[in-house]
Image: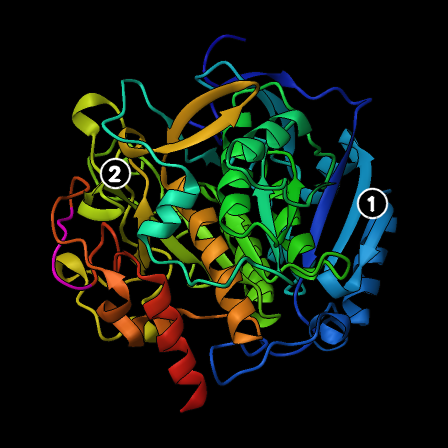
Amino acid sequence: MSAIHAHCAFPDARYLGPRDDQDHMEVTVVLRRRADRPALARWPSTKPHDRASFGDRFGADPLDIEKLRGFAQEHGLQETDCQAHRRVMRLRGSVPALQRAFGVELGHYQATDGRQFVGCKPSPRPDQLLGPHVIAVLGLDQRPVAKAHFRVAQQQPSQSFTPVQVGQLYGYPADTDGSGQTIALIELGGGYQQDDLDQYFASLKMATPNVTAIGVAGGGNQPGGDADGEVLLDIEVAGALAPEAAIAVYFAPNTDQGFYEAISQAAHDTTHKPSVMSISWGGPEASWSEQSFNAMQSALEDALAMGVTVLAAAGDDGSSDGESDNQPHVDFPASSQYTIACGGTKLQSSDNSIVSEVVWNETASNEGATGGGVSTKVSAPDWQSGITLPEGKRGRGVPDVAGNADPLSGYQVRVDGQDTVIGGTSAVAPLWAALIARLNQSLGTSLGDVHAALYQIGATAFNDIAQGNNGRFDAGKGWDACTGWGSPKGQALLEALQGMKQS
């Protein structure tokens, strides 16, 4: 069938035909918490919840689990896993059984870029089918939900940097190296080869950091594709700037199921115990279904409650976030109130000092621009009450912070045996993750939800970026919807946070 399916849930995709009745699929069912929402570990007053006991209070209610088991048995679905502390049950079934159970029609689709995926119509409504104890049913719709926010320079960069040089320009605190911390990297594709890491860090005259690959929901370290640039950029930036931190790389498929599972498993990981999480993938808010959005929000909220600071790239397509409706859009999960949204700048230096830093916007030469704007799904959090949002908008302002992202002032990295220069807000998330790891080390505890502290500290600990725009929005004094508060002054930020702890 060559035409667009009449009832296709994906307006830009072609319906290719039904899913084979003999196929089996596994879905992730996300349950509500058994108690009220957990208090977030807000710096410096609220301590994080302990991972080991978090599920006892905020995991799934045993009665809700039994209701779901009854539903599964009634519809011929097999329970393959249940992790009550993460509020997750996995169910497996044939295509006909899943269609009857969740009231959907499964089919094969082809996206405009040629990729094929399994989709369903209509989108499942777990609250109607299963009741209020279920937040989401993930895995029936397997379309890619996010893209990696990195940019390879298409022309000769005006200047490029090692991550170490960028950390020096931003005044990362001396006598810190991330010791005792674990940085979680969320990856929805690609992979790395150990030889690349060894050669890269040897070129920086550094030991290769401790990197562990963790497969999630069928994902794994699979180098050899375009997404390798994202994976290596994340590891090399984080590892160069926090060389004694452990790095745990969670590989998951690029689906809402995979994305949710990666964040949730990293947040609850009692083996690696990450204190910082870096996410360099995302998609426009409008592209997320309500149930996927809600599930992601619940996983991110769990992370903050357990003291994990989450950094997310704000996007590389300016204020439109790559949408073609001539309206501003922000990227999710950067637009979540539970993430520190990371925007991008163009950085120029001389004699180990910053001589220029402006908003990253190379749209005219097809080299990208920083994302930023105002959420239409997330209300303005209390910690943004003191800023002025553009155009009288109401919603969560994006980004919170920024850092060097322009590929024409990008990062010297090694990918699949080749030395190259890469930029994008993808680089800013691990850049800040490494800084948070070093701050945690110096402070002797995890910062957790540091939003309120950053907004209270304001311009004194940031390089204010007052020149440039990202399309719809202009930079200006103080916070703006291009670069947030600006790029970090690492030592000044540490001292400000220490002052809050003592007061």
Amino acid type of the residue tagged 1 in the rendering: His
Q: Nearer the viewer, residue 323 or 97?
A: 323
| Residue at the image position 55 percent from the left and 37 percent from the top | 122
Earlier in the chain: of badge 2 and badge 1, it is: 1
Closer to the observer: label 2 or label 1?
2
| Tag shown at residue 85 | none
- Percent position of residue 470, x then y: 19, 41
| Tag shown at residue 75 | 1
> From what the image shows, is residue 117 above or below residue 51?
above
- Percent position of residue 340, x then y: 41, 59
| Residue at the image position 21 percent from the left and 62 percent from the top | 479
What secondary structure do most residues of the magenta stretch adopt? loop
Q: Quadrant of residue 171?
A: bottom left
Q: Nearer the viewer, residue 247 or 392?
A: 247
The answer to whether one can see residue 476 in this image is yes
Residue 476 sits inside the magenta stretch: yes
Q: Nearer the viewer, residue 286 or 229?
A: 229
Q: In which quarter of the image is residue 267?
A: bottom right
Residue 61 is left or right of residue 185, and the answer is: right
Q: Distance between the residues labelled 2 and 1?
A: 46 Å
Amino acid type of the residue tagged 2 in the rendering: Gly
The answer to whether one can see residue 285 in this image is no
Read off the magenta span.
473-478
